[in-house]
Image: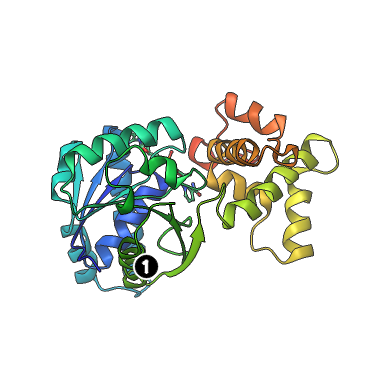
Amino acid sequence: MKTIENIMVIGAGQMGAGIAQVCAQGGYTVYLHDKNDEARTKGINTIDKLLERSVQKQRISAQEKEDALKRLTLSNRLQDAEQADLIIEAVVENLQVKASIFHELDKIAPTHTLLASNTSSLPITELAAHTKRPDQVIGMHFMNPVPVMKLVEIIRGLQTSEETFQTIEQLARNLAKTPIAVNDFPGFVSNRILMPMINEAIYTLYEGIATVEDIDTSMKLGMNHPMGPLTLADFIGLDTCLYIMEVLHEGFADSKYRPCPLLRQYVKAGWLGKKSGKGFYNYS
Ligand code: NAI
């Protein structure tokens, strides 16, 4: 198994910031990179706020908060990949964008560095093919919000080595997460099951069968889900939901995964859910 001490996280959005936080709390040195200045500032502010909340709730001490923040460095240069034993990519769910980042990172990072993607649905095998180290490329799919949710799906690409898999599985355990092993198929396990349900909830709204609130109440009180599917869609981000449905639709070539036209329309309008202030609900 490889030794991991320095981790670089690419993308300081909802997921990247959460991943950087749990890695820093787990004792790792972390570089949090985003190409966007505002996103970096927002990311570190969110981490600070969440750690402070944990101190208030006496889940961690003030010293532990300070130590975690000391292990975190913001980065605006992809070149910082030179320092990393592991890079976890968490940028937008778009194959072209991720592939070009993997291609760049492969040129910068030392030969021993592992490259992981937090993708919700995109093929790890294809991302790996954009590098000269496909055996060291793997999927490490955290759930949202990262500091709270226990599951991590670990996805083996076609060429991922056993050493890479074992190293990442152990890292997930070191971060107090529960890993599951998944093969490289569209949507993996969690989103293959979740996203068609969310898409169906959006169709139910689109066809005028019930209101947003009643659709959510149906699944909360009828099925004992902690959160209704439309609330959850807003929370995940409607752009991310649409990308994942498109990956399922294209990957399986099956019309049962056709994204709902209402989902497309909301994304075109810039209604991306909680992060943009409006989705199926208002957050302003
Ligand atoms: P987000 O939109 O909150 O954050 C993405 C960040 O990536 C932004 O800050 C953006 O500035 C940055 N970025 C974009 N292109 C970049 C580049 N070329 N170089 C550096 N930074 C760049 O998105 P979110 O929700 O954090 O999702 C990120 C990834 O995590 C996606 O692949 C998504 O599918 C996956 N994911 C999302 C979950 C969710 O519930 N939102 C759950 C699990 C995985």
Q: Is residue 55 above or below residue 43?
A: below
Q: Residue at x 33, y 63 (%)?
A: 168
How far across and down, in percent of the image, does residue 125 sit?
Answer: 43, 45
Q: Nearer the viewer, residue 140 or 56?
A: 140
Q: Residue furthest top?
A: 268
Q: Is residue 230 above or below residue 92?
A: below
Q: Amino acid at mark 1?
A: Glu
Which quadrant of the figure shows ligand 1? top left
Confirm or reject: label 1 Cβ below 8 Å from ligand 1.
Answer: no
* Quarter location, residue 57: bottom left
State left or right for residue 101 relative to residue 200: left
Which residue is located at x 32 percent, y 53 percent? 135
Residue 195 point in image, percent of width and height = 64, 48
Please state if 130 lies on the left or on the right of 119 as rendered.
left
Q: Position of residue 280 (x, y in %)?
A: 65, 39
Residue for badge 1:
169
Find numbered disc 1 in the image and state the secondary structure of the residue it sits on: helix
